[in-house]
Amino acid sequence: MENKTLLNSTLITSYALFVSISYLWGFWGHFDINILNYISVSDIIKSAIWPMIIALAMYFMQVAMNNYNGPRTDLSVKYSDMSKHEKFDYILRHSYIVIMACLVIGGVIYNAITGNKMVRYAAIGWVLATIVFFTTWRNQVVMAYIPFKNKGLFYSMLCFLPVFFLSRGVNDGDKIVAGENTFLVESNSLCSSKENDKYRYIDVMADKAFALSLKDNSICIFKFENIKLVREKRSNAVS
């Protein structure tokens, strides 16, 4: 009988692409650009390298936790019958879960109320990922595909990694819009004939460079060859 497992090249590649696209959408959504129209699948694969590295790092952390963690507290034992060490372990683990849940819920509510469009999308993503995780993580059919000891931990990584990268993309895009640690394209002849027009460098994808006009927030897309960038002063931040 064929073993059920998530560890096959098709699923791993598809998942890495999904995580990478989540980041790209979160970043480029600020500029109303469908970046997939300007890049190839190979470019997406290149941008998926970091998500794959981080996923592997998280997996090895999980393996290390399995190897170094001692026997866990028997949860069937009443709290009053536990030793001091078992009580401490019980309180520590459950306090961590409660604190993390409160932080996530508080952050999601705050961002949903005060954030811009992309921040709200990221907040919705956290809600959906949380719902998916808590409604499926006890499903034995789903868990049978995870060939690791700590199935719940690994499955939580699978559920939350895409929305984590979505949020990271949203955050990086916010920094560009706000003019935080950004650069200006020194020569603007590729984007405008007016000398006083300033364009903020966004990123380079494939053979194209993208810049944001500080005058009207339009996007300049030009062939990337050699461009010179200068550090932008905070006074140039786009409102």
Image: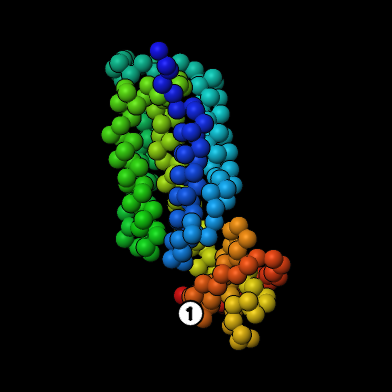
Instruction: Give residue 74's position: percent from left, percent from top.
Output: 36, 16
Instruction: Give residue 2's position: percent from left, percent from top.
Output: 42, 16
Which quadrant of the view contains residue 130? top left
Please report the residue visible at 46 percent of the width from the left and 39 percent of the height from the top. Answer: 15
Q: From where the camera sits, is residue 92 visible?
A: no
Please report the residue visible at 44 percent of the width from the left and 23 percent of the height from the top. Answer: 5
Instruction: Give residue 41's position: percent from left, percent from top.
Output: 53, 49
Q: Residues within 10 Å of mark 1 (few under 14, many from 20)?
A: few
Q: Is residue 173 above or below residue 127?
A: below
In the image, 173 versus 31, the foreground residue is: 31
Please report the residue visible at 51 percent of the width from the left and 37 percent of the height from the top. Answer: 13
Q: Amino acid at mark 1?
A: Asp
Q: Which image quarter holds the N terminus?
A: top left
Q: Is residue 22 above or below residue 53?
A: below
Instruction: Give residue 181's position: percent from left, percent from top.
Output: 60, 65
Q: Is residue 167 above or below residue 238?
A: above
SS at mark 1? Answer: loop
Q: From where the camera sits, is residue 103 visible?
A: yes
Which quadrant of the view contains residue 161? top left
Badge 1 is on which residue? 216
Left or right of 189, for residue 61: left
